Amino acid sequence: MAEPLSHPMLPQDEHNERLIANVHPPDWVNPEPADKYHLVVVGAGTAGLVSAAGAAGLGAKVALIERDLMGGDCLNVGCVPSKGVIRAARAWKEATTAAEHFGAPATTGEGDFGKAMRRMRRIRADISKVDGVKRFHDLGIDVFIGSGRFVAADAVEVAGHRLRFRRAVIATGARAAAPPIPGLADVDYLTNESIFSLTELPRRLAVIGAGPIGCEMSQSFARLGSHVTLIDMAPQVLIREDKDAAAVVQEAMVEDDVNLELGVKVNSVEQRDGAIVVHLERDGQEFEVAADHLLVAVGRAPNTDGLGLEAAGVEYGRRGVQVDERLRTSNKRIYAAGDIATKYQFTHTADAQARIVLQNALFFGRAKTSDLTIPWCTYTSPEIAHVGMYEKDAVEQGLEVDTLTIPLDDVDRAVLDGEDAGFLRVHLKKGSDQILGATLVAAHAGDMIGELCLAVTHKIGLGKIVSVIHPYPTQGEVIKKMGDLYRRGSLTPTVKKLFSWWFKLFS
C-alpha cells in the first residue's frame, strides 16, 4: 500500500477524495523495480513530471518517486487553486460594479464563499488526472509512492526497494517557510499550503508579505468580502517591479479595500482574545493589527530534508541543490531541476529546466540555463507581466537603452473594456529596435506578454513586430502601437529633411 500523506488534504469532501485518488491513491502498490533505470526522478512536481514523461516518450526506462501528491505545488497548493480563487474574486467584483459601469442589473446580498471554493476543488480534481499516477503508469513509467532517499552515488531507496540508475533528477521543489517572527510558531497561521482548505470566509485576514502570493490573495479575499490588511517591510507592493508599475496595482488594491501597512517592522505575533494579533512598528511608533486568520506569504525553503544527498555526493545549501548551468550537481550522474535548484520558482521555469535535463542527462546535450529567457506574471487586477531586463539590469551590465512607454488608455479596446489602468514599457538596445526587456501592466498581461517573450528570446525587433497585422480592436494592439511609436521616433531630423526634399519634387 502507498505511504500515507504527510498531512491530510482538507476538507475531506468528494472533490479532494477524487484528487487524492488520482495523485496519491491509497491502494497503490509500488511495482517491482527494474535491474537498472536510465532515469530515476525524485519528486513529481512539474520538473519531475516533465522529465519522466519526456524520457519515457523517448524510450528510456524511467522510475518516478513521489512521497506526497503528484502534481506538486502547482496543481495542489499553487497555480491551480490560486487561479480558481482569483477568478471567483474577479467575478464577484464584476458583479458588484456592473450596474455602475455598464448599466447592468444591480446585485444585492452576500456571495457564497463555500460554493466558490467547492468550484475550485472540483476543477482541481478534474485537472489532476493529467498529473495522476494512472497516466504516468500508462506511459510506461514505474511510479513509486513513498519517500525516496539516495543511498549511493547511483542508487535510491524507496518503500523498501533499491533503484539503481544511470542518471537521476532531483525535483523535490520547495515549501513555504516561516520568517523568524517572535510568537509566530505559537499561532495557527496559514500559508499557500493551507489557505485553499478554507471553507468559510475569514471576517478579518492579515497577510504578511506583499510579494506575488500576498498581493494576489489579499486582493482576492478583499473582493470576496474579507477585511484584509497587507503587511510588508518594503515601501511598496511587489518590490521587484518598477515603482510605477507596482503603483498601478497598489492603487487597484486600495480601491478594493485592502488596508496596506507598508514600510513596517513585524515585532511579534500573539494569540489574544480569540484573535491573532500582529504587533507592528513604523518610524518608532508601535501599533497592532488583529485578525481572525493570518496568511504568511514570505520565504521558501528547498525540500532537501531526508533525501540522503550526502550519500550521493550531492552538494546543497539553504537555497537548495547546487547545480551548474547545465543543471548537473556535484555528482555528474545526478541533475536537479525546478524550485530545488533555481531562484526563478515558476512552473514554466521548472518545465523549461526539465527539458534541459533531458538533453543533457540522456544525450550529449550542452543546453544551459543561462540561455533561458524567463518571463513571469503576477495575477492581480491588473496583472503585471515581465520578460527580459529591467532598466536597472541593463545599467548593471553597462548597457545603454532607449525606453518607450505607452499607457493602456491609448488603446481603444482597453478603454471600451474599462480596463485601461496600466501601460506597456520596453527597453531597447540604444540606437536599435532590439527589445532587451518589457513590462506590461494590463488586465490580461499574462496572456499578452507571449509576443514580447518571442521577440526578446529570438531578437525580433519592433520593426518586424509593427509589420505584422494585428487584429483590431484588441488590448494586445498595444504592442503594435509600441512599434508605431518606435518608427515615429526613428524619423531623425536628417531623415525628415530628406522626406521634405522628396515631396517638394512632387509639389
Image (cartoon, rainbow, N blue to C red):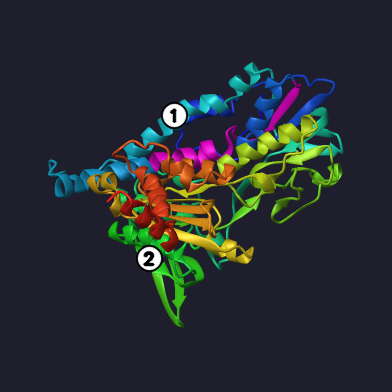
Which residue is painted at 51% across and 42% down in the image? 78
| Horizontal arrangement in the rendering, residue 163 relative to residue 2 (left or right) | right
Does 70 appear in magenta? Answer: yes
Residue 209 visible from this viewpoint: no
Which residue is painted at 54% across and 25% down in the image? 130
Query: Nearer the observer, disc 2 or disc 1?
Result: 2
Do residues under tags 2 and 1 come within 8 Å of each other at their CB atoms?
no
Q: Which mark is residue 15?
A: 1
| Horizontal arrangement in the rendering, residue 306 relative to residue 192 (left or right) | right
Q: Which mark is residue 260?
A: 2
Q: Determine whether the residue tagged by mark 2 lies in a helix, strand or loop.
A: strand
Whole-percent x, y for residue 461 in the image = 51, 46
Q: Reply above or below: 216 against 196.
A: below
Which residue is painted at 39% across and 58% down in the image? 496
Q: CA distance from mark 2 to mark 1?
A: 35 Å
| Horizontal arrangement in the rendering, residue 465 relative to residue 26 (left or right) | left
Instruction: Please name the amino acid that badge 2 sits on.
Output: Leu
Which residue is painted at 72% across and 36% down in the image? 357
Front position in the image: 91 or 114 = 91
Whole-percent x, y for residue 382 in the image = 36, 51
Instruction: Please name the amino acid that badge 1 sits on.
Output: His
Whole-percent x, y for residue 44 in the image = 64, 33
Q: Quadrant of residue 154?
A: top right
Q: Determine whether the residue tagged by mark 1 lies in a helix, strand or loop.
A: helix
Front position in the image: 419 or 408 = 408
**Marks 2 and 1, the one that precedes in the sequence:** 1
Identify the magenta region: 60-85
Whole-percent x, y for residue 432 in the image = 53, 54
Q: Reply above or below: 146 against 455.
A: above
Which residue is the extreme one toward the bottom? 284
Q: Quadrant of the N terminus?
A: top right
